[in-house]
Amino acid sequence: MIDWSQFTPQSALTGGLMIGLACALLWLLNGRIAGISGITAGVLSSSGAERQWRLAFVLGLVLSSWVWLLLAPLPVSQVTSNYWLLAIAGVLVGFGARLGSGCTSGHGICGLSRLSGRSLVATVTFMAVAVATVFIVRHVV
């Protein structure tokens, strides 16, 4: 659930700008698309300089919450679901990202900004399945 009383458009805009800047810099400086599933998979399968930038990117994602904590408090997070169910869901999302040749960041952010038709189809599919899943979980099950 979104706590609308705590929602601040400024933080959402700042986060979106930072994601866009990171994607643009990775593309301009490295010639790579900022698709998280591909970058993460490459940490395990590549070597040398290729592995180094991928590892730095993933570590930046992980460590960014601690950097933010130095600037402002993080929102309170409460997990109310079964941890095994969350782990299985994570594996399925990873499998789906590999099956779809990319994830929401690769297709939805980078692909759409490059006007990729394949990314448009992938993003519409992601969103349709997400809407259907929420409907089924909240109203059917």
Image: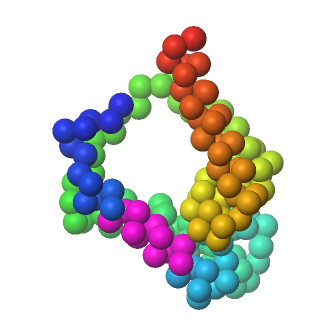
Q: Which of the pair 111/42 is nearer the observer?
A: 111
Question: Which segment is the magenta one?
Answer: 14-24
Residue at left offset 57%, top offset 11%? 140
Residue at left offset 60%, top offset 27%? 133
Q: Where's residue 138, x and y in %?
A: 50, 18
Residue at left offset 59%, top offset 35%? 130
Q: Where's residue 51, x and y in %?
A: 69, 76
Quarter of the image where one finds residue 107: bottom right
Residue 66, visible in the rendered structure: no
- Compared to residue 26, the image places residue 64 above or below, namely above
State the quadrant of the C terminus.
top right
Q: Which of the pair 93/20 is nearer the observer?
A: 20
20 drawn magenta: yes
Q: Where's residue 54, x and y in %?
A: 63, 73
Looking at the image, what colour scheme do you see?
rainbow
Is residue 91 shown left or right of residue 57?
right
Residue at left offset 37%, top offset 62%? 15
Is residue 9 shown left or right of residue 31?
left
Residue 117, visible in the rendered structure: yes
Q: Main secondary structure of the magenta part?
A: helix
Q: Which of the pair 59/100 is nearer the observer?
A: 100
- Compared to residue 36, the image places residue 18 above or below, namely below
108 drawn magenta: no
